[in-house]
Amino acid sequence: MGLNIGLLGGLSPVLGGFATSFGVTMEGNMASAFGVSELHLFFSGRMGATSDTSALRDEVIARFDGTNEWVHPAGGIGAGSFPGSAAALQVELGILKRFYISGPLFAELGFGASLSNLSTEPEVFNGQKITYSLTSFAGLAQGAVGVQLLPRLLVKLEGGYRFGSGTTQVSV
C-alpha cells in the first residue's frame, strides 16, 4: 500500500570493476491501478566511487585520436596523467513484481531503464581543466530474494543486468 522508501548499499558494477555504493529506492504500489497484486513502480538512485580508472582511460584513448600522447596511467611518465579515481551516479526507473513464497520469504522480478555516469575530477593540463566521463543508457532486468521482517521492513539481496550503450566525453 502506498509509497515505500528504502536505503541501498553494496557493490555496483562500473567500467572495469566495482564501486562501493549507497543510495535510496522508492516503490509505489500499482496493484489497484492494474489489478495485479504486489506490482510496484520503482525508482532508485545510487552514488559510488572507484579508485580504478584504467578502463575509462583505455576507453578515452581508444575513442579519441591523439589522446595517447597526453593520457597516461595515474602517476605515469609523460605529458599528462589520468585521474586515479572517479565518481559514479546511477538512476533507475522500472516496474517489479513481488512473489511471496512462504510466509515472509519473497522473490522479485523487475524490468526498467537505467542512466549511469562515471566522471573523474577535473585535471589541469596545459592550463586547461579536463574532465573525463562515460554516460550510458541501458535497459535493465533484475531479480531479488528477501524476507519481510516487519510489515514495513524488507531485507533483500538483489542482482541485475544492464544492457545498453554509452558515450565517452572529454570536457575542456
Image: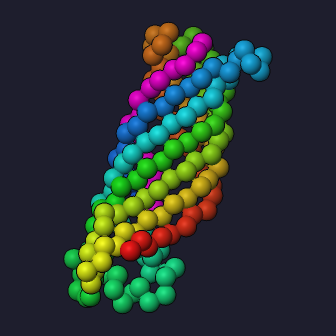
- On screen, residue 138 versus residue 132, left or right, reads right
Q: Is residue 15 above or below residue 35?
A: below
Residue drawn 58% across and 15% down? Answer: 2
Q: Which residues are magenta?
A: 1-16
Question: Is residue 169 or residue 138 the one in the foreground?
Answer: 169
Q: Is residue 24 above or below residue 54?
A: above
Residue drawn 47% across and 40% down? Answer: 45
In this view of the protein, can residue 81 be seen by the observer? no
* Quadrant of res 36: top right
* Quadrant of res 27: top right
Question: Is residue 2 or residue 96 the one in the foreground?
Answer: 2
- Report the predominant secondary structure element of the magenta stretch: strand
Residue 1 is situated, as x and y percent measured from the top left of the image, at 60, 12
Q: Is residue 115 above or below residue 107?
A: below
* Quadrant of res 6: top left
Residue 141 is situated, as x and y percent measured from the top left of the image, at 63, 43
- On screen, residue 99 versus residue 104, left or right, reads right
- On screen, residue 3 versus residue 110, left or right, reads left
Residue drawn 33% across and 86% down? Answer: 70
Q: Is residue 72 magenta?
A: no
In this view of the protein, can residue 104 be seen by the observer? yes
Q: In the rendered image, which quarter contains the C terminus?
A: bottom left
Residue drawn 33% across and 53% down? Answer: 49
Residue 56 is situated, as x and y percent measured from the top left of the image, at 42, 69
Q: How many marks?
A: 0
Residue 52 is situated, as x and y percent measured from the top left of the image, at 33, 63
Q: Is residue 5 magenta?
A: yes
